[in-house]
Amino acid sequence: MTKNAFPRGAAIAGVYEHPSRFSPNKTEFQIMAESAKGALDDAGLQRTDVDGLFGASMSMGMMGIVDLAEYLDLYPDYLDGTNIGGSSFVAHVTHAAAAVNAGLCQVALVLYGSTAASNSMAIGTGGTGGSRNPDAAFSAPYGMTTVGSYATYANLHMATYGTTSEQLAEIAVTMRQHAGLNPLAKMRNPITVDDVLQSRMISRPLHLLDCCIISDGGGAVVVTSLERARDLAKPPVQLLGCGEAVQHQGVGYSDILTIAAKQSGARAFEMAGVKHSDIDLAMIYDSFTITVLATLENLGFCPSGEGGNFVSNGGISLGGTLPVNPDGGGLSSNHPGMRGIFLVIEAVKQLRQECEARQVPDAELALAHGTGGTIGDKHSGATLILGVDR
Amino acid sequence: MSAIEHPLPFASWESRGFWEGAGRGELVLQRCQTCGLVQHRPRGVCAHCLDGSTLVHFAASGLGKIYSFTVTEQNQAKGFAEACPYVMAYVDLDEGPRMLTVVVDCDPDNVAIGAQVTVDYVSQTRDDAEMFAIPVFRLS
């Protein structure tokens, strides 16, 4: 897979981020339906134009995508309920672009919805109960939590490269600064490095403020051909490069410091034919502060072990070397369990220059990288490189 | 802080050798007689040869060193909530593969990456007559 994976061109024609952060009176599918309306309106399309349906959520299992089609009374020609964790929606954009290029559908709708916060879901520290999954049987007896898995990564990174808790805290501080510029963000009061370091320890070395928030929310993305997108309501955002990968324990010999982003990012950059220094902003899945540092290194924005310096002194803030998550990310804006769709939505809005106070000036090229599952244990990664149409 | 109450492991026929071995006081791994791969977690086939007939079980030394770890201070799951803080760790076994485990009976401040550890076993109280145990590790 190199250049010309999408010879017809592929574009994102509409996006919508559900404004809610707490929706106790809504269901997942209702949030998805409201988001679908928002993204179709954004693109200037109708519900009946949709002939490809993509979606995932924390409760959609087998038949979930069919249930979703029923809820929306849709009869699409193409279905994809791929669920590889929080990165699913980033991967859906690639899958949708491929389907559009293969002529299997024309207008693909990608959906996500969640009521994690109003369900009081303990996403990171819900721990491990018994499980009949034969693989989980080797995690459950040992008290693996999501945050615990990322913490093993952080500890190893610190021991290997001398990364510090202060450097990780800088990431949380920057995300909160950005959230202050986003009227929809859940947590907008500024915080300091000391606030992060003095917040409750959850799993050493990760403190409470090293962890993403838990919110409700959802969103939608419309993918179509570049040609079709050019006739629609908003300027198209072009898909220039993409990649997917996994990292896991294998048969017991993995280098856990190497995450999926290394493989998916390399493919995306090769396909797009652009350099790291060309990227105007990056949307990086920030389940935890360490996730951002690990992802930036593995994507190649800095050498392994240099992530601590890269994120310090405003390096990833608006105006920094590489602005990351101008919306405030999962650490401060919203994290309903599977955040990938917001990476795509914010990247598109930035490239359309719609982000007002948090706008990256003249942004023309954006990278979005989603991580699904748990770094340290096993996870998926999906990378997109998106650009303005020219 | 109390001892962890480990959930009962679900043993499929693929993983039964591991849990039964622990019940006998052995850390049981799988080796492929064709390619020599020592793999963990256990599978019904050698993951590289995709053949189950080539696999043998053997008792490992129970020695290893800590690859990475975390001191878990919050876990809401029953059996672990009361045991916080506890040390969850990846241990690189001397025979090669890495396993997830806990390091018990230690001051968390004394646990370090690279530290040598030795296996021990926590017996399971079960109502299904199985003789399983949970392999855990102690600082050597």
Image (tube, coloured by chain):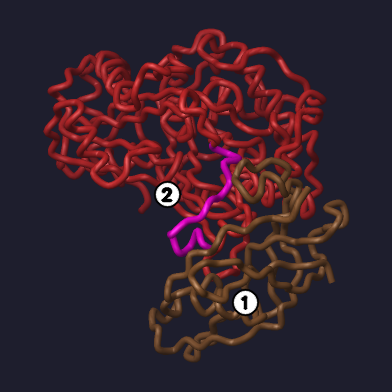
Chain colours: A red, B brown
Nearer to the camera, A316 or A187? A187
Residue B83 shows up from this direction: yes
The total of numbered circles placed on residues is 2
Please give the name of the residue rendered at 29% of the width and 15% of the height, measured from the top-left corner: A42
Q: Are marks 1 and 2 on the same chain?
A: no
Crowding near the residue tagged with mark 2, few <14, some 14–19, many ≥20 C-alpha atoms within 10 Å: many
Specify the amino acid type for callout 1: Ala
Please give the name of the residue rendered at 47% of the width and 86% of the height, measured from the top-left corner: B55
Residue underneath mark 1: B22
Using residue A69 as the reference point, say whether residue A251 is left or right of it. right
Using residue B30 as the reference point, say whether residue A35 is left or right of it. left
Please give the name of the residue rendered at 39% of the width and 83% of the height, measured from the top-left corner: B51
* Chain where mark 1 sits: B
Nearer to the camera, A122 or A168? A122
Q: Quadrant of the C terminus of chain B?
A: bottom right
Residue A244 circle label: 2
Per the model, the C-alpha gap separating discs 1 and 2 is: 38 Å
Residue A13 shows up from this direction: no
- The residue stretch that appears in magenta: A123-137
